[in-house]
Image (cartoon, rainbow, N blue to C red):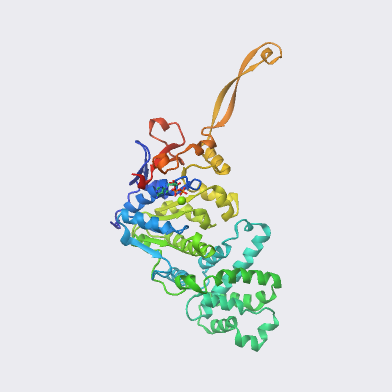
Amino acid sequence: MKTSKNKRYNLDTPLIQLTEHDVWTARDACAGTCIFGTTGSGKTTGSFNNIASSFLINNFGGLWLCSKEDDIDNIIKLAAKTGRLQDLMIINPNNPLRFNFLNYQYNQQKMRHGSGAGLSENIVNLLTTMTDVGKGDKKGSGSENYWQDTLHQLLINSVDLVIYGGKNGLNLLELYKAVISAPTSPAQTADTKWQNSSLCWQLLSQGMDKKKSAEEAHDFDITATYWLNEFPNLDEKTRSIIVSSFTSMANSFLRGKLHTLFCTETNVIPEMCWLGQKILVVDLSVKEYQKLGVLANVLVKYCFQKSAEIRSLDENSTVTFLICDESHLTANSYDRFYQSTARSKNLATLYASQNISGYYATLGSKDETDSLLGSLKTKIHHSNDDKITAEWFADTVGKNWDQRMGISGSAMGQGSTGFHSHQDLNWSVLPRELMLLPSGGPEHDYMVGSYITVAGRKWLAPEYQKKTYIKRIWNQEFGQ
Ligand SMILES: Nc1ncnc2c1ncn2[C@@H]1O[C@H](COP(=O)(O)OP(=O)(O)O)[C@@H](O)[C@H]1O
Ligand SMILES: [Mg+2]
Protein backbone atom coordinates (compact mmCIF):
# COMPACT_ATOMS: atom_id res chain seq x y z
CA MET A 1 0.00 0.00 0.00
CA LYS A 2 1.36 3.43 -0.94
CA THR A 3 0.63 6.62 0.91
CA SER A 4 -1.02 9.22 -1.30
CA LYS A 5 -0.10 12.86 -1.84
CA ASN A 6 -2.62 14.09 0.68
CA LYS A 7 -2.11 11.44 3.26
CA ARG A 8 1.19 11.36 5.12
CA TYR A 9 2.39 8.08 6.55
CA ASN A 10 1.11 7.78 10.11
CA LEU A 11 4.22 7.79 12.26
CA ASP A 12 2.19 6.59 15.24
CA THR A 13 1.87 3.21 13.51
CA PRO A 14 2.86 0.64 16.15
CA LEU A 15 5.76 -1.59 15.15
CA ILE A 16 6.76 -3.45 18.30
CA GLN A 17 4.97 -3.95 21.63
CA LEU A 18 7.80 -3.30 24.07
CA THR A 19 5.86 -3.84 27.30
CA GLU A 20 2.16 -4.38 27.95
CA HIS A 21 1.84 -0.57 28.09
CA ASP A 22 4.62 0.70 25.83
CA VAL A 23 4.67 0.65 22.07
CA TRP A 24 7.61 1.30 19.76
CA THR A 25 6.29 3.19 16.75
CA ALA A 26 7.37 4.20 13.25
CA ARG A 27 8.27 7.57 14.80
CA ASP A 28 10.68 5.81 17.17
CA ALA A 29 12.11 3.85 14.25
CA CYS A 30 12.82 7.12 12.41
CA ALA A 31 14.80 8.39 15.38
CA GLY A 32 17.32 5.59 14.74
CA THR A 33 18.25 2.35 16.48
CA CYS A 34 21.51 0.76 17.47
CA ILE A 35 21.82 -2.73 18.88
CA PHE A 36 24.83 -4.06 20.77
CA GLY A 37 25.75 -7.56 21.92
CA THR A 38 28.73 -9.87 21.89
CA THR A 39 28.91 -12.61 19.23
CA GLY A 40 26.26 -15.21 20.03
CA SER A 41 24.33 -12.86 22.34
CA GLY A 42 21.25 -13.14 20.12
CA LYS A 43 21.29 -9.69 18.57
CA THR A 44 20.59 -10.89 15.00
CA THR A 45 18.00 -13.52 15.87
CA GLY A 46 16.60 -11.41 18.73
CA SER A 47 15.90 -7.70 18.43
CA PHE A 48 17.40 -7.17 14.96
CA ASN A 49 15.23 -9.72 13.13
CA ASN A 50 12.13 -8.75 15.09
CA ILE A 51 12.52 -5.07 14.24
CA ALA A 52 13.50 -5.76 10.62
CA SER A 53 10.42 -8.02 10.28
CA SER A 54 8.21 -5.23 11.62
CA PHE A 55 9.58 -2.96 8.85
CA LEU A 56 8.84 -5.59 6.21
CA ILE A 57 5.35 -6.39 7.54
CA ASN A 58 4.52 -2.69 7.35
CA ASN A 59 5.60 -2.58 3.71
CA PHE A 60 8.61 -0.30 4.20
CA GLY A 61 11.22 -0.31 1.47
CA GLY A 62 14.87 0.44 2.01
CA LEU A 63 18.50 -0.51 1.73
CA TRP A 64 19.88 -3.60 3.45
CA LEU A 65 23.63 -4.13 3.57
CA CYS A 66 25.20 -7.58 4.10
CA SER A 67 28.27 -8.08 6.22
CA LYS A 68 28.34 -11.88 6.58
CA GLU A 69 27.99 -14.55 3.90
CA ASP A 70 24.77 -15.92 5.40
CA ASP A 71 23.07 -12.51 5.85
CA ILE A 72 21.36 -12.96 2.50
CA ASP A 73 19.75 -16.25 3.65
CA ASN A 74 18.37 -14.44 6.69
CA ILE A 75 17.00 -11.60 4.52
CA ILE A 76 15.32 -13.99 2.08
CA LYS A 77 13.83 -15.95 4.96
CA LEU A 78 12.39 -12.81 6.59
CA ALA A 79 11.10 -11.49 3.23
CA ALA A 80 9.39 -14.84 2.52
CA LYS A 81 7.81 -14.90 5.95
CA THR A 82 6.47 -11.36 5.59
CA GLY A 83 5.27 -11.74 1.97
CA ARG A 84 7.89 -9.37 0.53
CA LEU A 85 9.93 -11.66 -1.73
CA GLN A 86 8.70 -9.85 -4.85
CA ASP A 87 10.16 -6.56 -3.52
CA LEU A 88 13.70 -7.87 -3.06
CA MET A 89 16.30 -6.39 -5.43
CA ILE A 90 19.56 -8.17 -4.72
CA ILE A 91 22.81 -6.79 -6.09
CA ASN A 92 25.36 -9.60 -6.38
CA PRO A 93 27.58 -11.03 -9.14
CA ASN A 94 24.94 -13.64 -10.09
CA ASN A 95 22.12 -11.16 -10.65
CA PRO A 96 21.64 -8.72 -13.55
CA LEU A 97 21.20 -5.61 -11.35
CA ARG A 98 23.75 -2.88 -12.04
CA PHE A 99 24.40 0.50 -10.45
CA ASN A 100 26.87 2.82 -12.17
CA PHE A 101 27.36 5.07 -9.18
CA LEU A 102 29.32 7.88 -10.86
CA ASN A 103 26.90 8.16 -13.74
CA TYR A 104 24.01 8.10 -11.28
CA GLN A 105 25.51 10.89 -9.16
CA TYR A 106 26.34 12.90 -12.26
CA ASN A 107 22.80 12.61 -13.62
CA GLN A 108 21.35 13.52 -10.22
CA GLN A 109 23.51 16.61 -10.18
CA LYS A 110 22.49 17.61 -13.68
CA MET A 111 18.84 17.08 -12.83
CA ARG A 112 19.06 19.24 -9.71
CA HIS A 113 21.33 22.00 -10.95
CA GLY A 114 20.97 21.89 -14.73
CA SER A 115 24.72 21.75 -15.08
CA GLY A 116 27.11 18.88 -14.50
CA ALA A 117 30.25 20.70 -13.52
CA GLY A 118 31.23 23.13 -10.79
CA LEU A 119 28.85 21.45 -8.36
CA SER A 120 30.66 18.17 -7.95
CA GLU A 121 30.73 18.27 -4.14
CA ASN A 122 28.57 15.14 -3.73
CA ILE A 123 30.66 13.16 -6.17
CA VAL A 124 33.89 14.32 -4.59
CA ASN A 125 32.63 13.56 -1.08
CA LEU A 126 31.63 10.09 -2.22
CA LEU A 127 35.08 9.48 -3.73
CA THR A 128 36.72 10.88 -0.57
CA THR A 129 34.59 8.63 1.65
CA MET A 130 35.62 5.67 -0.47
CA THR A 131 39.32 6.52 -0.39
CA ASP A 132 38.99 6.77 3.41
CA VAL A 133 37.79 3.17 3.69
CA GLY A 134 40.17 1.17 5.85
CA LYS A 135 42.01 4.23 7.17
CA GLY A 136 40.30 4.15 10.58
CA ASP A 137 42.22 6.07 13.22
CA LYS A 138 44.73 7.34 10.69
CA LYS A 139 42.11 9.92 9.72
CA GLY A 140 41.61 13.24 11.39
CA SER A 141 45.10 14.04 12.69
CA GLY A 142 46.64 17.41 11.83
CA SER A 143 48.91 16.17 9.02
CA GLU A 144 46.15 13.87 7.74
CA ASN A 145 43.92 16.91 7.32
CA TYR A 146 46.53 18.35 4.97
CA TRP A 147 46.43 15.15 2.85
CA GLN A 148 42.65 15.17 2.91
CA ASP A 149 42.54 18.75 1.63
CA THR A 150 45.09 18.07 -1.10
CA LEU A 151 43.30 14.88 -2.15
CA HIS A 152 39.98 16.74 -2.16
CA GLN A 153 41.49 19.32 -4.49
CA LEU A 154 42.79 16.60 -6.81
CA LEU A 155 39.37 14.92 -6.89
CA ILE A 156 37.33 18.04 -7.49
CA ASN A 157 39.58 19.11 -10.35
CA SER A 158 39.62 15.60 -11.85
CA VAL A 159 35.84 15.38 -11.78
CA ASP A 160 35.42 18.82 -13.35
CA LEU A 161 38.06 18.04 -15.96
CA VAL A 162 36.21 14.90 -17.09
CA ILE A 163 32.82 16.62 -16.99
CA TYR A 164 34.01 19.65 -19.02
CA GLY A 165 36.35 17.88 -21.39
CA GLY A 166 34.79 14.41 -21.71
CA LYS A 167 32.13 13.24 -24.07
CA ASN A 168 30.54 10.46 -22.01
CA GLY A 169 29.45 12.15 -18.78
CA LEU A 170 31.45 10.89 -15.86
CA ASN A 171 33.12 7.51 -15.65
CA LEU A 172 35.78 6.09 -13.41
CA LEU A 173 38.12 4.86 -16.15
CA GLU A 174 38.38 8.35 -17.63
CA LEU A 175 38.91 9.86 -14.18
CA TYR A 176 41.68 7.35 -13.53
CA LYS A 177 43.38 7.88 -16.91
CA ALA A 178 43.15 11.66 -16.57
CA VAL A 179 44.86 11.57 -13.19
CA ILE A 180 47.68 9.21 -14.17
CA SER A 181 48.40 11.17 -17.36
CA ALA A 182 48.58 14.57 -15.63
CA PRO A 183 51.82 16.58 -15.98
CA THR A 184 54.43 15.87 -13.32
CA SER A 185 56.57 18.94 -14.03
CA PRO A 186 55.95 22.46 -15.40
CA ALA A 187 58.22 21.67 -18.37
CA GLN A 188 56.11 18.68 -19.36
CA THR A 189 53.07 20.85 -20.04
CA ALA A 190 54.88 22.30 -23.10
CA ASP A 191 56.20 18.92 -24.31
CA THR A 192 54.29 17.88 -27.45
CA LYS A 193 55.20 14.22 -26.92
CA TRP A 194 53.43 14.33 -23.53
CA GLN A 195 50.55 16.34 -24.97
CA ASN A 196 49.93 13.76 -27.70
CA SER A 197 49.76 10.86 -25.27
CA SER A 198 48.00 12.46 -22.29
CA LEU A 199 44.26 12.10 -21.71
CA CYS A 200 44.56 14.95 -19.21
CA TRP A 201 45.79 17.25 -21.99
CA GLN A 202 43.17 15.97 -24.43
CA LEU A 203 40.39 16.68 -21.92
CA LEU A 204 41.79 20.15 -21.26
CA SER A 205 41.81 20.91 -25.01
CA GLN A 206 38.29 19.57 -25.49
CA GLY A 207 37.07 21.50 -22.45
CA MET A 208 38.65 24.67 -23.81
CA ASP A 209 36.77 24.27 -27.10
CA LYS A 210 33.40 23.55 -25.50
CA LYS A 211 30.74 26.26 -25.44
CA LYS A 212 30.40 27.48 -21.85
CA SER A 213 28.40 29.98 -19.82
CA ALA A 214 30.38 32.73 -18.04
CA GLU A 215 30.22 30.75 -14.79
CA GLU A 216 31.32 27.54 -16.46
CA ALA A 217 34.18 29.37 -18.20
CA HIS A 218 35.31 30.66 -14.81
CA ASP A 219 35.17 27.17 -13.25
CA PHE A 220 36.97 25.60 -16.17
CA ASP A 221 39.72 28.20 -15.92
CA ILE A 222 40.31 27.18 -12.29
CA THR A 223 40.43 23.51 -13.28
CA ALA A 224 42.86 24.21 -16.13
CA THR A 225 45.06 26.30 -13.82
CA TYR A 226 45.17 23.45 -11.32
CA TRP A 227 46.29 20.90 -13.92
CA LEU A 228 48.75 23.13 -15.76
CA ASN A 229 50.24 25.06 -12.85
CA GLU A 230 49.38 23.79 -9.41
CA PHE A 231 49.55 20.02 -9.87
CA PRO A 232 52.91 19.92 -11.73
CA ASN A 233 54.40 22.20 -9.06
CA LEU A 234 53.29 20.04 -6.13
CA ASP A 235 56.02 18.43 -4.09
CA GLU A 236 56.83 15.04 -5.70
CA LYS A 237 56.01 13.08 -2.54
CA THR A 238 52.71 14.90 -1.97
CA ARG A 239 51.69 14.32 -5.56
CA SER A 240 52.45 10.61 -5.52
CA ILE A 241 50.63 10.09 -2.18
CA ILE A 242 47.40 11.75 -3.29
CA VAL A 243 47.48 10.14 -6.73
CA SER A 244 48.01 6.68 -5.24
CA SER A 245 45.27 7.25 -2.60
CA PHE A 246 42.84 7.75 -5.44
CA THR A 247 44.19 5.18 -7.90
CA SER A 248 44.37 2.37 -5.33
CA MET A 249 40.66 2.87 -4.55
CA ALA A 250 39.76 3.30 -8.23
CA ASN A 251 41.68 0.16 -9.16
CA SER A 252 39.21 -1.94 -7.15
CA PHE A 253 36.48 -0.80 -9.54
CA LEU A 254 38.35 -0.96 -12.83
CA ARG A 255 38.21 -4.72 -13.17
CA GLY A 256 36.30 -7.80 -12.08
CA LYS A 257 32.99 -8.00 -10.24
CA LEU A 258 32.94 -4.47 -8.82
CA HIS A 259 33.53 -3.03 -12.29
CA THR A 260 30.65 -5.01 -13.79
CA LEU A 261 28.27 -4.19 -10.95
CA PHE A 262 29.15 -0.55 -10.32
CA CYS A 263 30.81 0.92 -13.43
CA THR A 264 28.79 -0.31 -16.41
CA GLU A 265 25.04 0.23 -16.81
CA THR A 266 22.36 1.30 -14.30
CA ASN A 267 19.10 -0.61 -13.88
CA VAL A 268 18.56 -0.07 -10.16
CA ILE A 269 18.57 3.24 -8.27
CA PRO A 270 18.09 4.10 -4.57
CA GLU A 271 14.85 6.00 -5.33
CA MET A 272 13.14 2.62 -5.87
CA CYS A 273 13.41 2.11 -2.10
CA TRP A 274 10.91 4.89 -1.34
CA LEU A 275 9.05 5.46 -4.61
CA GLY A 276 8.50 1.72 -5.20
CA GLN A 277 8.99 0.51 -1.59
CA LYS A 278 11.58 -1.98 -2.87
CA ILE A 279 14.13 -3.72 -0.67
CA LEU A 280 17.55 -3.09 -2.16
CA VAL A 281 20.11 -5.58 -0.87
CA VAL A 282 23.86 -5.31 -1.41
CA ASP A 283 24.90 -8.94 -1.18
CA LEU A 284 28.68 -8.51 -1.30
CA SER A 285 29.42 -9.44 2.25
CA VAL A 286 32.33 -7.78 3.98
CA LYS A 287 33.40 -11.18 5.35
CA GLU A 288 33.62 -12.71 1.86
CA TYR A 289 34.74 -9.77 -0.26
CA GLN A 290 36.67 -7.94 2.48
CA LYS A 291 37.74 -4.44 1.42
CA LEU A 292 35.85 -4.74 -1.88
CA GLY A 293 32.73 -5.59 0.12
CA VAL A 294 33.20 -2.54 2.34
CA LEU A 295 33.73 -0.31 -0.72
CA ALA A 296 30.58 -1.64 -2.40
CA ASN A 297 28.52 -1.19 0.76
CA VAL A 298 29.89 2.27 1.42
CA LEU A 299 29.25 3.53 -2.09
CA VAL A 300 25.66 2.28 -2.28
CA LYS A 301 24.96 3.51 1.25
CA TYR A 302 26.31 6.97 0.49
CA CYS A 303 24.30 7.30 -2.75
CA PHE A 304 21.20 6.05 -0.92
CA GLN A 305 21.73 8.48 1.98
CA LYS A 306 22.31 11.51 -0.25
CA SER A 307 19.15 10.84 -2.25
CA ALA A 308 16.98 9.70 0.66
CA GLU A 309 17.64 12.81 2.69
CA ILE A 310 16.24 15.01 -0.06
CA ARG A 311 13.31 12.71 -0.85
CA SER A 312 9.96 14.39 -1.30
CA LEU A 313 7.44 13.11 1.23
CA ASP A 314 4.70 14.34 -1.13
CA GLU A 315 5.53 11.53 -3.55
CA ASN A 316 5.57 8.69 -1.02
CA SER A 317 6.03 9.18 2.70
CA THR A 318 6.11 5.54 3.81
CA VAL A 319 9.04 4.95 6.13
CA THR A 320 12.22 3.90 4.31
CA PHE A 321 14.85 1.88 6.17
CA LEU A 322 18.61 1.55 6.19
CA ILE A 323 19.49 -1.79 7.79
CA CYS A 324 22.94 -3.04 8.53
CA ASP A 325 24.08 -5.88 10.80
CA GLU A 326 27.72 -5.60 11.97
CA SER A 327 27.27 -1.93 11.07
CA HIS A 328 30.62 -0.73 12.40
CA LEU A 329 32.31 -2.33 9.37
CA THR A 330 30.73 0.14 6.94
CA ALA A 331 30.36 3.13 9.26
CA ASN A 332 31.79 6.38 7.89
CA SER A 333 31.87 10.06 8.62
CA TYR A 334 28.75 10.82 6.58
CA ASP A 335 26.51 8.60 8.73
CA ARG A 336 26.00 11.14 11.50
CA PHE A 337 25.05 13.88 9.04
CA TYR A 338 22.51 11.56 7.46
CA GLN A 339 21.12 10.74 10.88
CA SER A 340 20.58 14.40 11.66
CA THR A 341 17.99 14.68 8.85
CA ALA A 342 16.68 11.09 8.87
CA ARG A 343 13.90 11.79 11.36
CA SER A 344 12.28 14.55 9.31
CA LYS A 345 12.39 12.45 6.14
CA ASN A 346 10.82 9.27 7.55
CA LEU A 347 14.07 7.33 7.35
CA ALA A 348 14.58 4.52 9.84
CA THR A 349 18.13 3.38 10.55
CA LEU A 350 18.68 -0.03 12.16
CA TYR A 351 22.29 -0.83 13.06
CA ALA A 352 23.64 -3.80 15.01
CA SER A 353 27.18 -4.24 16.17
CA GLN A 354 29.15 -6.10 18.83
CA ASN A 355 30.66 -3.20 20.70
CA ILE A 356 31.65 0.44 20.63
CA SER A 357 35.32 -0.28 20.00
CA GLY A 358 34.40 -1.54 16.52
CA TYR A 359 33.02 1.91 15.71
CA TYR A 360 36.09 3.62 17.19
CA ALA A 361 38.31 1.52 14.93
CA THR A 362 36.38 2.30 11.74
CA LEU A 363 35.42 5.91 12.41
CA GLY A 364 38.80 6.75 13.86
CA SER A 365 37.66 8.76 16.85
CA LYS A 366 35.60 8.58 20.00
CA ASP A 367 33.97 11.94 19.25
CA GLU A 368 32.70 10.80 15.88
CA THR A 369 31.42 7.56 17.39
CA ASP A 370 29.69 9.37 20.27
CA SER A 371 28.09 11.74 17.81
CA LEU A 372 26.77 8.94 15.58
CA LEU A 373 25.54 6.74 18.43
CA GLY A 374 24.05 9.75 20.20
CA SER A 375 21.91 10.38 17.14
CA LEU A 376 20.44 6.84 17.24
CA LYS A 377 17.81 7.29 19.93
CA THR A 378 16.81 3.68 20.67
CA LYS A 379 19.64 1.64 22.15
CA ILE A 380 19.22 -2.08 22.68
CA HIS A 381 21.83 -3.98 24.65
CA HIS A 382 22.11 -7.75 24.62
CA SER A 383 24.57 -9.84 26.58
CA ASN A 384 28.01 -8.24 26.43
CA ASP A 385 31.33 -8.70 28.20
CA ASP A 386 33.01 -5.75 26.51
CA LYS A 387 33.94 -3.39 29.35
CA ILE A 388 33.74 -0.15 27.34
CA THR A 389 30.32 -1.00 25.88
CA ALA A 390 28.93 -2.25 29.20
CA GLU A 391 30.04 0.91 31.02
CA TRP A 392 28.67 3.07 28.22
CA PHE A 393 25.36 1.23 28.60
CA ALA A 394 25.39 1.83 32.37
CA ASP A 395 26.17 5.51 31.78
CA THR A 396 23.26 5.80 29.32
CA VAL A 397 20.88 4.31 31.89
CA GLY A 398 22.26 6.79 34.42
CA LYS A 399 23.25 7.07 38.05
CA ASN A 400 21.40 7.30 41.38
CA TRP A 401 22.35 8.93 44.65
CA ASP A 402 22.40 6.12 47.23
CA GLN A 403 22.13 6.94 50.95
CA ARG A 404 24.68 4.99 53.03
CA MET A 405 25.10 4.76 56.82
CA GLY A 406 28.57 4.76 58.31
CA ILE A 407 30.00 4.35 61.83
CA SER A 408 32.44 6.90 63.17
CA GLY A 409 34.10 7.38 66.56
CA SER A 410 35.21 4.83 69.22
CA ALA A 411 33.86 1.85 67.40
CA MET A 412 36.52 2.84 64.91
CA GLY A 413 38.98 3.36 67.82
CA GLN A 414 38.66 7.19 68.05
CA GLY A 415 36.61 9.09 70.72
CA SER A 416 32.86 8.59 71.14
CA THR A 417 30.83 6.38 68.83
CA GLY A 418 28.47 7.94 66.28
CA PHE A 419 26.64 7.20 63.07
CA HIS A 420 26.67 9.31 59.99
CA SER A 421 25.09 9.06 56.58
CA HIS A 422 26.61 9.95 53.26
CA GLN A 423 25.52 9.78 49.63
CA ASP A 424 27.21 7.87 46.82
CA LEU A 425 26.54 8.34 43.13
CA ASN A 426 26.17 4.87 41.67
CA TRP A 427 25.09 3.31 38.38
CA SER A 428 21.36 2.39 38.45
CA VAL A 429 22.19 -0.79 36.55
CA LEU A 430 25.67 -2.21 36.88
CA PRO A 431 27.62 -2.94 33.69
CA ARG A 432 27.96 -6.60 34.67
CA GLU A 433 24.16 -7.04 34.53
CA LEU A 434 24.55 -7.30 30.76
CA MET A 435 26.43 -10.57 31.17
CA LEU A 436 23.44 -12.12 32.93
CA LEU A 437 21.05 -11.67 30.01
CA PRO A 438 19.83 -14.85 28.25
CA SER A 439 21.35 -15.25 24.77
CA GLY A 440 18.93 -17.58 23.03
CA GLY A 441 19.35 -21.15 21.88
CA PRO A 442 17.76 -24.21 23.52
CA GLU A 443 19.60 -23.56 26.80
CA HIS A 444 17.63 -20.31 27.19
CA ASP A 445 14.36 -21.61 25.72
CA TYR A 446 15.10 -19.53 22.61
CA MET A 447 14.74 -16.32 24.62
CA VAL A 448 17.07 -13.37 24.11
CA GLY A 449 17.23 -10.74 26.86
CA SER A 450 17.89 -7.05 26.41
CA TYR A 451 17.96 -3.68 28.11
CA ILE A 452 16.40 -0.89 26.07
CA THR A 453 16.73 2.87 26.40
CA VAL A 454 14.91 5.38 24.21
CA ALA A 455 16.11 8.96 24.65
CA GLY A 456 13.39 11.20 26.06
CA ARG A 457 10.93 8.35 26.57
CA LYS A 458 8.60 8.18 29.60
CA TRP A 459 7.76 4.54 30.18
CA LEU A 460 4.14 3.72 30.99
CA ALA A 461 4.57 0.21 32.36
CA PRO A 462 4.21 0.55 36.17
CA GLU A 463 7.48 -1.26 36.91
CA TYR A 464 9.47 1.14 34.69
CA GLN A 465 7.68 4.45 35.31
CA LYS A 466 10.59 6.08 37.13
CA LYS A 467 13.26 4.30 35.14
CA THR A 468 15.27 5.30 32.09
CA TYR A 469 15.24 1.76 30.67
CA ILE A 470 13.10 -1.31 30.24
CA LYS A 471 14.06 -4.96 30.07
CA ARG A 472 12.64 -6.94 27.19
CA ILE A 473 12.79 -10.55 26.10
CA TRP A 474 12.81 -11.35 22.37
CA ASN A 475 11.76 -14.71 20.97
CA GLN A 476 13.97 -16.35 18.39
CA GLU A 477 11.53 -17.35 15.69
CA PHE A 478 12.99 -20.83 15.13
CA GLY A 479 12.24 -21.62 18.77
CA GLN A 480 8.54 -20.82 18.51
N1 LIG B 1 19.06 -21.35 13.41
C1 LIG B 1 19.27 -21.53 14.73
N2 LIG B 1 18.73 -22.59 15.39
C2 LIG B 1 18.92 -22.75 16.70
N3 LIG B 1 19.64 -21.91 17.49
C3 LIG B 1 20.19 -20.84 16.91
C4 LIG B 1 20.06 -20.57 15.49
N4 LIG B 1 20.70 -19.43 15.21
C5 LIG B 1 21.23 -18.97 16.36
N5 LIG B 1 20.93 -19.82 17.37
C6 LIG B 1 21.30 -19.66 18.78
O1 LIG B 1 21.08 -18.32 19.14
C7 LIG B 1 22.28 -17.73 19.65
C8 LIG B 1 22.34 -16.33 19.19
O2 LIG B 1 22.56 -16.25 17.79
P1 LIG B 1 22.67 -14.89 16.97
O3 LIG B 1 21.39 -14.17 17.06
O4 LIG B 1 23.16 -15.24 15.61
O5 LIG B 1 23.76 -14.08 17.79
P2 LIG B 1 24.56 -12.76 17.38
O6 LIG B 1 23.87 -12.14 16.22
O7 LIG B 1 24.50 -11.91 18.61
O8 LIG B 1 25.95 -13.20 17.07
C9 LIG B 1 23.40 -18.63 19.14
O9 LIG B 1 24.47 -18.65 20.03
C10 LIG B 1 22.74 -19.97 19.06
O10 LIG B 1 22.77 -20.57 20.34
MG1 LIG C 1 24.71 -11.63 14.31
Q: Quadrant of residue 222?
A: bottom right
Residue, x 44% and y 31% (percent of image)?
466
Residue 82, image x and y in percent? 31, 53
Image quadrant where residue 248 sits: bottom right
Image height check: is 104 above or below 404?
below
Is residue 236 visible in the rendered image? The answer is: yes
In this rendering, position of residue 411 left or right of residue 64 = right
411 and 217: which one is in front? 411
Residue extending furthest toward the top: 416
User: Looking at the image, which residue is at 62% across and 71% down?
Assistant: 244
Q: Position of residue 118 (x, y in %)?
A: 53, 71
Whether residue 318 is visible to the viewer of this picture, yes or no, is no
Farthest-out residue, front:
443
State which quarter of the image contains the C terminus. Answer: top left
Query: Whole-percent x and y of residue 467?
Result: 46, 33
- Residue 187 shown left or right of residue 344 in the figure: right
Could you tell me how many numbered marks the image carries? 0
Up the image or down, 118 lies above or below 444; here it is below
Q: Residue at x 64, y 58 (%)?
A: 138
Q: Position of residue 276 (x, y in %)?
A: 33, 62
**Along the line of sight, which residue is nearer the eye, 8 or 273?**
273
- Classify residue 264 as left or right of residue 180: left
Residue in the image at 56% along x and 81% along y = 203
Query: Could you tell me which quadrant the N terminus lies in?
Result: bottom left
